[in-house]
Image: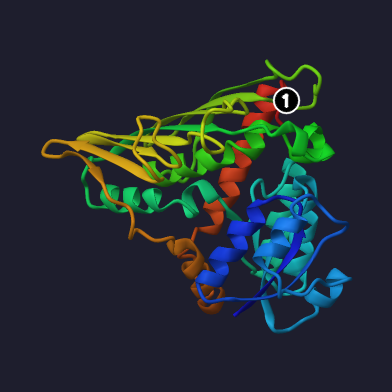
Amino acid sequence: MKFAALGIEHRHIFGMAKNMVDAGASFAGWWNDGDPEPLEGFRKRFPDVPRAADRRALLADREIDLFLIADRPDRRAALAVEAMEAGKDVMTDKPGCTTLEQLGQIKSCQAATGRIWSVNFSERFEVPSVTRAEALVAAGEIGRVVQTVGLGPHRLNKATRPDWFFDREAYGGILCDIASHQIDQFLHFTGSTDAEVTMASIGNFANAETPGLQDFGEIALRSSQGHGYIRVDWYTPDALPNWGDGRLTILGTEGYIELRKYVDVAGAPGTDHLFLVNGTRCEKVDCADAGLPYFGRLMADIRDRTETAMRQEHCFRVMELALEAQRMAEGIPRP
């Protein structure tokens, strides 16, 4: 199976492409309009992958099955529609789109073409401890899940960010962007197919010189299956050894699971720290062999026209809820 990339404006393309290669796919080529900041790192990781001068040459290549899209967020929807209309499946970086209008265009195109439009929610799909948590929940270790608390702090790295990073219309807002990860996890772990945004707020409390940046956001969700709380921000302090202390707490009727995904500030080395507490167990659970099944499952879905990596309606609803929360936080009436 061959894939190509349209847009490498965000470093998430590194993980998207590497994990597809690790799953057995072949990286056939890439295109980007201009030379973005991640270009040097991209070339170091994929030195033998050719750059196409015109994306239409890649779209016309019948051997390419899948397109990865990590262009500027507000450009991703149009590229996804173009790829699906060319008969290709799509994995896009989050957010997959920045407006409800864009999402409507994607839905219409996906329905007409039957192609796959998948958003790589990397805070679930690229984190082995989340894979292990899924197995523990499925095995009934904490009973029925009734709440998730998702925290998504990020390091700002202001000096290295492109201009579009500070343009609200370009990146879509902090809830549309970062919080889509935690919305995905809420729906997934509570087994919800739908939810209501009951509270959403945003702020810029530390970066007045860049008024287009939203550096704080929060959401409360409610479904027939449970409740959720989400907090995201751009406040990761310099002393933390990585980009953010991302955490997820999954509360069940018979126990809970806490994931310290990227770092343990208590001092344990490495990543993927998972703690399980229930009626008989209070322990740290090893996640070393948990794996990242999303990428192999997506390859199987492309081949078999199935939905094992992620249901299409789930993907749509995550982005819809993120966009609804963003509008609520900004005081924009529902369309």
How many numbered marks have been drawn onto this rendered protein structure? 1
On the image, the x and y values in percent for residue 126 come to 49, 54
Answer above or below: position of 201 versus 120: above
Closer to us: 257 or 209 = 209
- Quadrant housing residue 232: top right
In the rendered structure, the answer to whether residue 325 lies left or right of residue 266 reads right
Asked if residue 264 shows in the view, the reply is yes
- Quadrant housing residue 312: bottom right
On the image, the x and y values in percent for residue 253 come to 23, 33
Closer to us: 247 or 218 = 247
The type of residue carrying mark 1 is Pro
Query: What colour scheme governs how the chains and residues are painted in the rendered image of this protein?
Result: rainbow
Q: For the residue labelled by badge 1, is the local secondary structure a helix, a strand or a loop?
A: loop
- Residue at the location (51% across, 78% down)? 304
Closer to us: 111 or 39 = 39
Asked if residue 117 shows in the view, the reply is no
On the image, the x and y values in percent for residue 214 come to 70, 26
Q: Which residue is mark 1?
A: 333
Query: How dense is the environment of label 1, judged by Cα within 10 Å: few (below 14), some, or many (20 and up)?
Result: few
Answer above or below: position of 296 versus 187: below
In the rendered structure, the answer to whether residue 126 lies left or right of residue 83 reads left
- Quadrant housing residue 219: top right
Where, quadrant-wise, is the N terminus in this rendering? bottom right
Answer above or below: position of 101 versus 6: above
In the rendered structure, the answer to whether residue 155 lies left or right of residue 280 reads right
- Residue at the location (80% across, 71% down)? 51
- Residue at the location (69% across, 63% down)? 44
Where, quadrant-wise, is the C terminus in this rendering? top right
